[in-house]
Image (cartoon, rainbow, N blue to C red):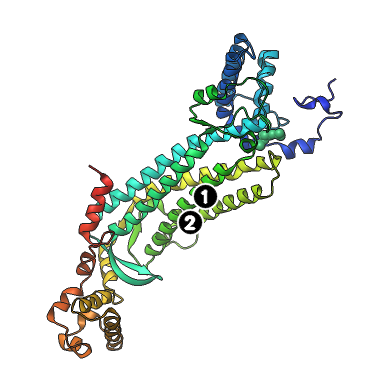
Amino acid sequence: MKKHDKPWGGRFSEPTDREVEAFTSSLHCDRRLYRYDIEGSIAHARMLARQGIITPAEARKICAGLRAILAEIGAGEFVFSPDDEDIHMAVEKALIGRIGDAGGKLHTGRSRNDQIALDIRLYLREEIGQTLALVGALKAGFLALAKKELGAVLPGYTHLQKAQPVLLSHYLLAFWEMLDRDEGRLRDCLKRVNVMPLGSAALAGTGLPLDRRWVARLLGFKTLTANSMDAVSDRDFIAEFIFAASLVMMHLSRFCEDIVLWSTDEFGYVEIADAFTTGSSIMPQKKNPDVAELVRGKTGRVYGNLVALLTLLKGLPMTYNRDLQEDKEPLFDTVDTLQACLKILAAMIGRLSFNHERMEAGAGGGFSTATDVAEYLVMKGVPFREAHGIVGRIVAHCIKAKKPLTGLTLAEFRRFFRGFDKDVFGRLTVRQSVNVRKVVGGTAEQVVRERIAEIEGP
Ligand code: ARG
């Protein structure tokens, strides 16, 4: 009987301890990479034959065997054995079991160190593509909503205190801008994911005449990694992806926070459709914004994944270390969490109804047009700091007299500054306040319309 049945068992005199086997295995997690692992192996085998390292017949057997395994795993018929260390070993063992000795030639000129680097890059390249599509769909959702709600006003806040009236569409397009930058970051990250590491072998490259460029072309990579030591230990591209994902999540979370707040009785600006809310097991009257809360909560998980990965990497001596196996759980969890949140929010924003009356009433409260009065004075030649002081005193007077700015008479205005005229009343309304903000990037309806046209393109 063989003392050891591991492919690397030659120098070992006793089998691996059962607990060690379970502890070191990553199969539960990395089996998810099977498609990419097999795709990479097929490309590698074809290249080996092309280079005369194995025979064409051997390559054909290997590729056919790998395709059969691919189909079996895909159909859920493949039996994973608990003592397989990882997806690479599971597939290789099955291949040898299926086609015999030729299977043992697949790993020529390759190490699991460059193999896993390839698998993750293939996987992430595809998932970034998926994520980009979802970000695009959510952007389209915000844009469509901004178009539908054009004209509706909203109190704009700073410090969560009413600040100045804005268009709801302007607010919604702010998220379009955030997601647009997110899209750019993901595309940029993709450039560094899309680099082919195979041929780096364990860490130093190989003496066998591999054609790395040919493999890259076959697998759709534009460039090759330029340093084998870097290639087997580099996980920057994962960290970059999780960082980009963290920013997307932060943006989603901030939107969700507003929706949670605005759907309260206190704000009452928005109602989320029943299908996108949940009830309470004890309080019959409750309708809770759980989707928005969960997106906000899940943001913390994604940040956690980023910190986990960065911490994993910081003390690693060159080059590959088994610690790196721990990169996959944070990565997979980030991909799953991010995509789920993008999907559910794209659906949810189509199911929001805004309460225009409440928003409009809110927009006019809190002396939100005070800056407009100050700007009015500026146009009459008053230095801004002085204008600020005058209007501050007017607001203090209004608070004491318990009336809004619109409740003042011209005589009252004139008590604070003689240069006030009837035309000041034209600067006190919410609409006016919004529509004078015609500066590039401002909230005036005309400017928002122009931005929408720009986004939509010719
Ligand atoms: N399961 C390993 C990982 O995820 C694959 C590489 C293992 N390499 C090794 N020399 N043990 O990183």
Identify which amino acid the numbered label 1 is placed on. Phe
Say which residue appears at 40% left-offset and 57% top-offset. 255
Q: Residue furthest right?
A: 13
**Discs 1/2, front:** 1
Place of residue 425 in the rendered image (x, y in percent of width and height, measured from the top left): 16, 77
Residue 456 at what x, y percent from top left? 26, 45
The answer to whether residue 115 of the structure is visible from this angle is yes
The vertical placement of 284 against 1, above or below, is: below
Residue named by callout 1:
243
Binning the other alpha carbons within 10 Å of mark 2 as few (below 14), some (14 to 19) or many (20 upward) gives many
Quadrant for residue 92, please give it: top right
Q: Quadrant of ligand 1?
A: top right
For the question of whether residue 278 can be seen, the reply is no
| Image coordinates for residue 27, horizontal then vertical, percent | 66, 34
Instruction: Identify the residue under disc 2.
Output: 296
Q: Is residue 386 left or right of residue 326?
A: left
Q: Badge 1 local density, few (<14 within 10 Å), some, or many (20+)?
A: many
Name the residue rendered at 48%, 27% in the picture.
Answer: 220
Left or right: where does residue 112 sit relative to residue 283?
A: right
**Is 355 left, or right, of 409 in this rendering?**
right
Give residue 169's position: percent from left, percent from top.
28, 57
